[in-house]
Image (cartoon, helix red, strand yellow):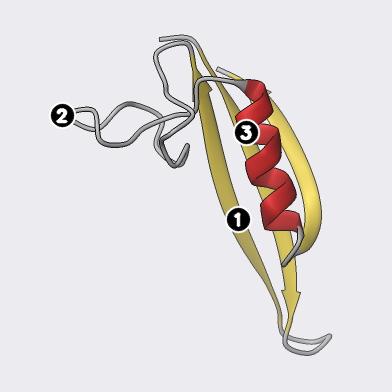
Amino acid sequence: MKQLIFTALALIFGNLCDAEVAQADFYVSTEGSDKWSGTKSDSVKGGGDGPFASLKRARDAVRDLKKTRDGDILLAGG
């Protein structure tokens, strides 16, 4: 299965000494669906969840995430 992985790294600061790093991974596959969460690399048995089908949907998911968190975006092939 051909897929891409979007990783959104968001820094959440409780204070400067105890910074936590939260990570969210979004997957894109030619066998995915833009109706799914995009957080799983393969489709779940029965087709209820899995990767996104398009880069546009993954981009929108990252934009939504960045509304509540700051951080870097990493795009990796797979």
The residue depicted at 80 percent of the width and 49 percent of the height is: 72
Residue highlighted by disc 1: 23
Question: Which is more toward the observer, 12 or 55?
Answer: 55
Q: Amino acid at mark 2?
A: Gly
Give the Cα distance between marks 3 and 1. 15 Å
Q: Earlier in the sequence, mark 3 or mark 1?
A: 1
Q: Which residue is mark 3?
A: 58
Mark 1 or 2 closer to N-term?
1
Q: CA distance from mark 1 to mark 2?
A: 27 Å
Q: Quadrant of the N terminus?
A: top left
Is residue 28 left or right of 7 when viewed as pictured? left
- Above or below 64: residue 20: below
Q: Which residue is mark 2?
A: 46
Amino acid bearing label 1: Gln
* CA distance for labels 2 and 3: 22 Å
Disc 1 residue crowd, few under 14, some 14–19, many 20+, Cα 10 Å: few
Badge 2 marks a residue whose secondary structure is: loop
Q: Quadrant of residue 54?
A: top right
Considering only order in the chain, which callout, 3 or 2, is on the residue closer to the N terminus? 2
Residue located at (55% from left, 43% from top): 25
Give the residue furthest to the left: 46
- Residue 45, by quadrant, is top left
Residue 19 placed where, x, y %?
A: 73, 78
Residue 58 picture location, percent across and down? 62, 33
